[in-house]
Amino acid sequence: MLLALIGAIALAGTPKASSQLSNADGKFPVDLAFDGRLGTAWAEGDKDNGQGQWIEIDLGKSMDLKGVSIWGGNLTDGERTFKESSRPAKLKVEVDGKALPESVRVKDEIARVDVPLTGSGRKIRITFEEVYEGYVFRDLYITEVAVNFPDNDPDVTKRLETWLASKDAEKKATAWEAQLDAAYETAKAEGEGSKEAFDFICRSVSDGPGFVYDQIQKTIPAGFRAQAIKSSKRAQKALRKLKDANGIPALNMAALRATGEESEQLAEQVEIFEAYRDLIGGQNRTNVRYWGENGFVPGALQSFGEPMGIEVDRNGRVFVADIGNNRIQVFSEEGRPERQWGGAMDVTDRWFTRGRKWYPSGAVAGEESGSWVTPIDVELIPEKETDGFAGIDALGRVQVYDGEGRPKISWKMETNREPEGGVGGEAYVAWLPKRKVLVAVMRDQAILYNLEAEELGRFKVEGGTPNALEVSPKGRLWIAEGREIVEYSTDGFRFGTVIPYSELDQGFEDMDLTVDETGRLWVITDTGWVHVFKKPGKKEFSIRALERPLKHPRMAVRQDVVYIVSDDRIDRIDIAQMRLDQAAAEKEKQ
């Protein structure tokens, strides 16, 4: 009887595999796929890429089965090691020699695969029918396998729970907390021993306190250790405070082990750390080419595909509503970034009135004066010697600055309209110089204000949210509704179409319009065509300014030089010179 009991204990949680990798980095036995840790892994040692290899766990006795979970790939150093080595693409699960009806497809991403099981069984074998081959190594890695995850069977965890309530465990927990606090202080100081201290914190995030892990190896059988290990909340807090992107793999492992709300919270922490990594990596860049490129450092632009309001003042300075960077930027006449309005660089998930994945922003998103949350449009307000400006953001906040760039006043539109991303612009500001009135539009709601923030009137745009808005030389409003331009009075009377689709180029979907210093109306379409009208109904010329298609273009013009912002860059095009060059080319052909 005693021998039989000893034999049953020896068999409980016994793993096997078709092969084992041994190389210059060491050995990768099958036990590493059942030790509960996500920083270790079994690797197959076959000459091929692991296709057809298998891994198995003998539970020692038949038990009720709810599922088997597989963490595929090599997660030692996060995304890099995951992609470097082979990982499963399709797997077959067998219970006591009987395969499930269908094989399981696995996405090529760092994730836990949960395969439901029913009934009872003793032996679970997983065969890897197809693999994603690593771009450096062909060896197939499996980080962990767990049975009935995330459930903790009381019969399995009883010995561990008893020990955790003991005075011995309490004493070790106190010593471990002191060690963690000391590691945090050392890592924060970044002096001697900081790497070892940081690694200690990361291990505590991914695999929990070391003293608990040691006890798990003694008391929990293979196949059930992954759910017994808990990430340390105290270590997570220390890692968050350090803001070191090298902690991303540890947070990823903790997220892969967690479930429900905790998993979502940890996944968000991974996003935040990735954003900080990108932010820190990009801060050192100082050589953004003139007129912008994608990014968040000064001079770069970040639209996430949305239109970016643009204006050029009497001195040739170009103002841009840098929507994804939560700032208004101004460029010199030569294209150098000169100044921005917004906070310091930071990471954020603010986007319109909702949110998106955390990302680095050129300015912190904020609701206080001088900060913006997704600025959508910008408009110049001429003063005696220079130009001030007004902007509007996704919260419906209008902020006005004087010619020196100092904040004058701000207010929030009283409207129940909310802008949405992905539709091509839903808020505008326009200045009526003769009346000294600012028109603010949020979707189809237009409101007129003086510069004391007093509402003077409002009306609904009959054609819905405009594609573009401009003030005519006579003080009326030209609004792009779909693919035609309509004139409105400032009290909302719709006079009708002034420029039909037939007077523009064919096949465009989006456009912008602006009025130059002489009162001419300029129209840019997303096909790259520019149309100039001396007045509605009297076209002066059309010209293809850009050969490439544009996404939600916005345009400003001064002295026949147009500034077109699209695709996170500004194109400066001398239309007068382009026309002269075309005329010369035509003359040479004759």
Image (cartoon, helix red, strand yellow):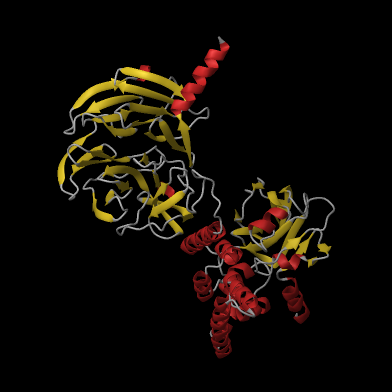
- Image coordinates for residue 311, horizontal then vertical, percent: 36, 40
Residue 503 shown left or right of residue 526 in the figure: left
Closest to the observer, 38 or 250: 250
Q: Is residue 413 above or below residue 564?
A: below
Closest to the observer, 276 or 299: 299
Q: Is residue 466 visible?
A: no
State which quarter of the image contains the C terminus.
top right
* Tally of numbered discs: 0
State which quarter of the image contains the N terminus.
bottom right
Q: Is residue 397 above or below residue 549?
A: below
**Residue furthest to the top:** 590
Q: Residue at x 69, y 58 (%)?
A: 81
Q: Is residue 456 visible?
A: yes
- Image coordinates for residue 424, horizontal then vertical, percent: 39, 37
Residue 12 shown left or right of residue 440 in the figure: right
**Residue furthest to the right:** 47
The quarter holding residue 95 reads bottom right
- Image coordinates for residue 176, horizontal then vertical, percent: 57, 84
The quarter holding residue 308 reads top left
Q: Residue at x 81, y 61 (%)?
A: 21
Closest to the observer, 75 or 215: 75
Residue 375 shown left or right of residue 89 in the figure: left
Residue 456 shown left or right of residue 344 in the figure: left
- Image coordinates for residue 500, horizontal then vertical, percent: 32, 19
